[in-house]
Structure formats: C-alpha cells, structure tokens
Amino acid sequence: MEGSKSSVQNSGIKLKIYKILNRKQMSTPTTTTLEQEHLAHHEHVHDHDDHEESFVSKYVFSMDHKVISRQFLITAVVMAVVAMVMSVIFRLQLAWPGEKFGFINAMLGDKWGKDGILDPNMYLALVTIHGTIMVFFVLTGGLSGTFSNLLIPYQIGARDMASGFLNMLSYWFFFVSSVIMLSSLFIEDGPASGGWTIYPPLSALPEAMPGSKLGMTLWLVSMAIFIISSLLGSLNYIITVINMRTKGMKMTRMPLTIWAFLITAILGVLSFPVLFSAALLLIFDRSFNTSSICLTFILEAVRLTMWVEVLFCSNTCSGS
C-alpha cells in the first residue's frame, strides 16, 4: 500500500513539473520564434524602403488629398497677394487723381506709369485682372479646391478622393492657368482691360482698345484651362460624396459643410461648360478668323439699326 501511494505521489509531482515547464515554453519565445520575428521585421523595413516616395511624387505630383489641398492654398495665397498689390495701385490713383507716386513708375515703367501717374488703360487692366483673380482664382479655385479636398474625405469617412489622378490634374490645370494669367501682365500691349466679365465687343475685337489684343487672348486661354480644372475637381467631389461615404452615413446624415461642397460642385458642373464654350468661341474668333460671337453682334446691330429706321420713319410719317 505504501509503495502504491508513493508511486501515485511521484506521478502527480511529475505531472505538475511537466505543466510548469510547458507554461514557461509557451510564455517565453524560443530562439526560432525570435529569429522569425527578426526576419519578418527586416523584410517589413526593406519593403518600406522600396516603396518610400520621392520628394517629387510626394509633394509636387502628389495624389494625396491633403497635399493637394495645401497646393491649392499656397497658389491661391500667392494670387491673392498679387491681386492685393493691384488693388493698392489703382485705389491710390483713384483716391488721389493726378497725384504722383514714385513706386508706380518703378513698378510699371514709363509706358504705364509715366511720372508716377497711372495710365488710364493700365487702370482698366488692373481692375480687370484684380477682379478676375479674386473671383476665379481665390474664391472659386482657391477656397473650393483647398477646403473641398481637405474636408470631404475626413467628414464622410473616406480614405481619399475618388480619383487621386483627376485630383492632381485639377490642381496642375489650375496652376498653369494662374501662370498664364500672370504672364499677361508682362506683355507689351498690356493685359486684358475689358472688365472681369469680358463682355464683347471689347473681348471679341482686337482693335477695340489696347487691352483687347494679346492680353485678352491670354486671358481667354487662362480661363479655358481654369474651367477644365474646375470641372475635373467638381466631378471628383460629386463622385466622392455619392459613392465613398462610410458605412451608415446616409445623405441625410452628412454634415452641412459637405452639402455645401456638393451643391457648389453641382452648380459648377452645370454652369462652367457654358462659360467654357463662350471662351472657346472667342478664342476662335480672335485667332482663327471665325465669326461666332462677332456675327451675332453684327446681326444684332443690323436689327437695331432697322428698328431705329422703322421707328424714325413712322414718327416722320405721322408728323407729316
């Protein structure tokens, strides 16, 4: 009996020792496990180095919505500063007509700022380019491009915009348009000076005024490229909001900010094609001798002349 009891106790002790050793092996990783973890970490670091983006792909031709929003913001701020300088120049001349400002001659030269007095044609040109930059490049392009790109993915729970490539194209079209608009300030005939609405015939006839020549053509080309940028961005915003909302976010649960961006994008898609077609027709009239806009004005002038003649004849006949 005593021998059987001792054998049972020994077996129980061996079982306890086996359990303790098994727990230690499970709690402390073996050398093989440590080597596997080290190799996995090394492969992860190696893959990360292989996929690390260069400066150009990360900050210049980026498809990340956050970087693109910064690009829109920086470009819009630069354009706003240029527009502010223009505003200071023509408002000073408007407030003190005939007053000589030395910095005007230093900035614009003898042709447009002789003796420190702003030339009337350059006054109209500065008003035109100032209004164009503030309305299109700062308010429409800069603010919409900045905040739509930054906030839409965050507030609807998306990882990024629907198309990063279209997003990148939208910014670079915007940038090229800004460069062309600023380059029109440095040509000999001066920039466009028909008002920021660019009504024909001042925009249709190169002989209408000094600012209706090459400067007007550059203005139209710049606006055509800007409209392409706005259309690409607006389509991207609409698709992102409709198709990439997070699970559970219905249209009725979207923040008011996203609704504002969505409605703005829809209005842009509806209105900008009309503006693009008008700019394109004006470019063709000026550069390729077509008669889309000019013919319309000629027909309207002929009809108005005939109406005046009929009215004059009726008054004359009734008087006689």
Image (tube, rainbow, N blue to C red):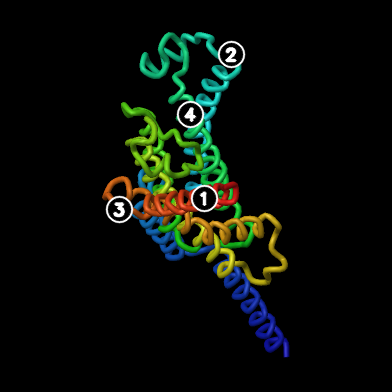
Q: Mark 4 and 3 residues: CB-CB less than 8 Å, in contact?
A: no
Real-space CA distance between mark 1 and mark 4, rounded to the nearest whole angstrom: 40 Å
**Callout 2 amino acid:** Trp
- N-terminal-most mark, 1 or 3: 3
State the residue position of label 3.
Answer: 290
State the residue position of label 2.
Answer: 96
Crowdedness of circle 2 by 10 Å Cα count: few (<14), some, many (20+)? few
State the residue position of label 1.
Answer: 313
Real-space CA distance between mark 4 and mark 3, rounded to the nearest whole angstrom: 27 Å
Please identify the quadrant where the N terminus is shown: bottom right
Left or right, 282 with reference to 87 = left
Q: Nearer the viewer, residue 98 or 35?
A: 98
Real-space CA distance between mark 1 and mark 2, rounded to the nearest whole angstrom: 49 Å
Q: Mark 1 and 2 residues: CB-CB less than 8 Å, in contact?
A: no
SS at mark 2 in the image: loop
Nearer the viewer's eye, disc 4 or disc 3? 3
Nearer the viewer's eye, disc 1 or disc 4? 1
Rendering coords of residue 130 (x, y %): 51, 32
